[in-house]
Image: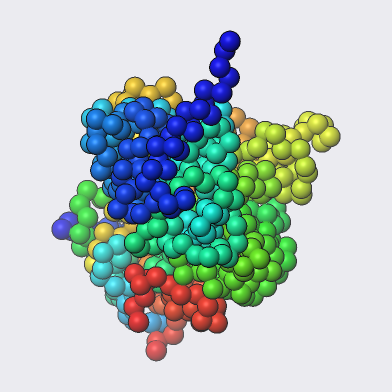
Amino acid sequence: MKNWQQGRQARDARIEAGAKLAKGKIVEARDATRLMEAVIRPGDRVCLEGDNQKQADLLCRALLAVDLARVNGLHMVQSGIVLPEHLDLFDRGVAKRLDYAYSGPQSARIARMLFGGKIELGAVHTYLELFARYFIDLTPQVALIAAVSADRDGNLYTGPNTEDTPTVVEATAFKNGVVIAQVNEIVDKVPRVDIPADRVQFVVEADKPFFVEPLFTRDPGAITEGQILTAMLAIKAIYARYGVQRLNHGIGFSTAAIELLLPTYGERLGLKGKVASHFALNPHPALIPAIESGWVEQIHCFGSEVGMDDYIRARSDVFFTGPDGSLRSNRAFCQTAGLYACDMFIGSTLQIDLQGNSSTVTTSRIAGFGGAPNMGADARGRRHPSAPWLQAGGEADPDSSALLRRGRKLVVQIGETFGEKNVPLFVEKLDAIELAEKLKLDLAPVMIYGDDVTHIVTEEGVANLLLCRDANEREQAIRGVAGYTDVGRNRDRKMVQHLRERGVIRRPEDLGIDPLDADRSMLAARSIKDLVRWSGGLYAPPSQFRNW
Amino acid sequence: MEDLSFHHQARSRAGGTRRMAIIGVVASGNLEVLAERVLPETECRLEIKTAAEGFGQVWDAVVADFVERYSPGGLKFSINDGGARPDTVSLRLAQAVRLMAEDEP
């Protein structure tokens, strides 16, 4: 007789072994490593939460200290490789194999370790992709998660940075896995139940709050005139042209400039209420002036942002909040919203090639994908119409039947033609290809594929790739906004002029914009302190952004 | 450091009566431009001291486009460059011409 309950029995055995260290579900922090040794088996798939922002740092350190005779060769399946300890696990041999999505802060070291063979790489994913695989072929046996508080039954309050937790717990708890949570405090009653107690087997009270990275704060003081000019071009040539109301913004300075120009330049263009009203977005502090000026109706968040909690709590008409008043974020749902319910993604990148493929990988840094490929991709399963989506579809394919024509998501790459240290944004060949050859990958790590990109905006102008009819036009449209980079200087001038006459390329003067007007006085806030003022004192910037 | 010098014929005289203008700062990624109305009406000269070496071709292209676009006849530009990006250079040069187009302060 076949045993159909082996997974459940294995889970029960793990829980029984761990229970010896627990009072009820609660385990002392000093016993956390022994708990790992009791519950985790060699070669297990483990999700160590590892999000874009919040980190189960105590559980990570506890795992790093295990007896290698008892725990080794783990397969880590986590969205973020953010803490140095996440990689120390591989150096020490606690873990062997890795499937992940984002490694921004560890991009240089993870590249070295991948080249050195220290990590057996499964794949680099987008967030949604990795979450999807949690339910198909990368289901964790053990999840190590982070929450703000727990009650004695194990109900968890995840606070504003809920992020990946519900997804990780869903996959683990309902497929014979064990969930261990670190919490900042144990309380009699949690402010709201984000994770019900029966999905949580053990709770460890940490001696200090879990680490959260302020990833989405851009100091308006650092925004340049060039970024203001590109922001003006984007607002006029894209936001206004298509009437984009539902959108996602990347985290760069160019999009911060757009956020700060909405209440000034956008207002002058009469766009209030017509564009940028519904966002899938982290709570960017730079959006405060637009929110306060009545531009923004609704924002759903992947995660939160350090210092924004009180502001969000006071603006529940705009944000998703729980009965306790604080933000409820959810990365999986927000990524889905960005993919299916937004008409535009606009963000920056490090390299764009002649086909419009873009990548943030350089030969010495692997930052992973995170969410940008989902935001910056046309959703082939989308079926609901909207004006911008239909308009973009019509521009791409004007001759086909309107009733059978797919719309197109607007996928906009915005940036200055030269980045830090005069490194060109435009290249003949992406570093990602060289990396793929070196690491013998089946796929080069391309962030956004050229066939998904609809517009490229630089200080030289806007290229509308929807209007290009063949690969050569596309290449010249890209060269035509590539400024003084080698790619830009090697343009076919006659053809670029022809593309300009057709409106494929639009220069500032074609849009009625004088580059000399791109001045910092146009920004609704010119410093972090201005943002605090706009928020009525509700925004509390983290110390590294304060100079007062 | 690299010294570069460009000499162009401009289509016409730069507007305004101002004799001299200065804009920008010498800082990393930025530049300072001094414009002086000291040349014959259709001549334009740029003297550049730059911290970034090997960008002569880029300067050549930036300067040619600038002269074509703004026709800064009669102006001499002295530039202290802290490794500014080409777009920043174009912007500062255009700002200098705009200042020169004002009346003598």
Q: Is residue A156 above or below residue A441?
A: below
| Rendered image coloring scheme | rainbow
- Which image quadrant is residue A74 in? top left
At x 76% / y 48%, what residue is drawn? Answer: A386
Expressed as whole percent of the image width and height from the top left, the position of residue A501 reads: 62, 46
Q: Is residue A387 above or below residue A354?
A: below
At x 34% / y 28%, what residue is drawn? Answer: A42
- Which image quadrant is residue B1 in? bottom left
Label tally: 0
Expressed as whole percent of the image width and height from the top left, the position of residue A313 reads: 59, 71
| Outermost residue toward the bottom in this view | B105
At x 44% / y 79%, what residue is drawn? Answer: A529
Expressed as whole percent of the image width and height from the top left, the position of residue A540 reads: 46, 75
Expressed as whole percent of the image width and height from the top left, the position of residue A129 reads: 54, 35
The answer to whether residue A96 is seen in the rendering is no
User: Looking at the rendering, in which quadrant would you find the C terminus of chain A?
Assistant: bottom left
Q: Is residue B26 above or below residue A436?
A: below
**Front in this rendered view, residue A105 or A196:** A196
| Outermost residue toward the left in this view | B1
The answer to whether residue A313 is seen in the rendering is yes
**Front in this rendered view, residue A312 or A483:** A312
Instruction: Answer left or right for A491 relative to A192.
Output: left
- Which image quadrant is residue A405 in? top right
